Amino acid sequence: MGWLLAMVLAAGTPAFGYEEVRVVETHELPVPREGAGPGASHRLRLSLHVFRGARWSQEEVAAAVLESAGLLRQCGVALSGAELRVEQEPRRFHV
């Protein structure tokens, strides 16, 4: 049990040389009106994150969200909103 406490404490301690990840922009993405159809049994609000300078651009993320709204609608899920946050982070986080 003591080792578990030590692991939890170690996981919560910032590493030496810690580099900050921060949100530098926030955008509300337009959601199609038909995405919130009356037959929906569930509603979904997305929080999306993209790294500045990564492979996925803000425009590509927005396009993917609009495309996914149609797929979700077929499953009875209405896309009620989507917020995109652009993050600035150390280069080592980019894939």
Image (cartoon, rainbow, N blue to C red):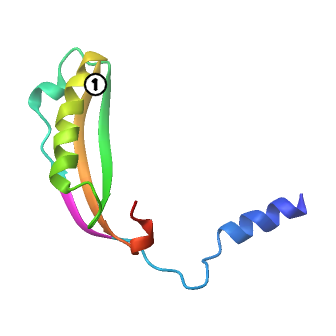
- Determine the image quadrant of residue 37: top left
Q: Nearer the viewer, residue 78 or 89?
A: 89
**Residue denoted by label 1:** 72
Dominant SS of magenta comes to: strand
The residue furthest right is 1
| 26 magenta-colored | yes
Chain part drawn in magenta: 23-27
- Vertical relation: 73 (above or below) 33: above
Mark 1: amino acid: Leu
Residue depicted at x 55% and y 85% = 17
- Vertical relation: 26 (above or below) 20: above
Residue 8 image point, x, y percent: 73, 63
Helix, strand or loop status at disc 1:
helix
Residue depicted at x 12% and y 43% = 30
Residue 83 image point, x, y percent: 24, 51
Residue 23 image point, x, y percent: 31, 68
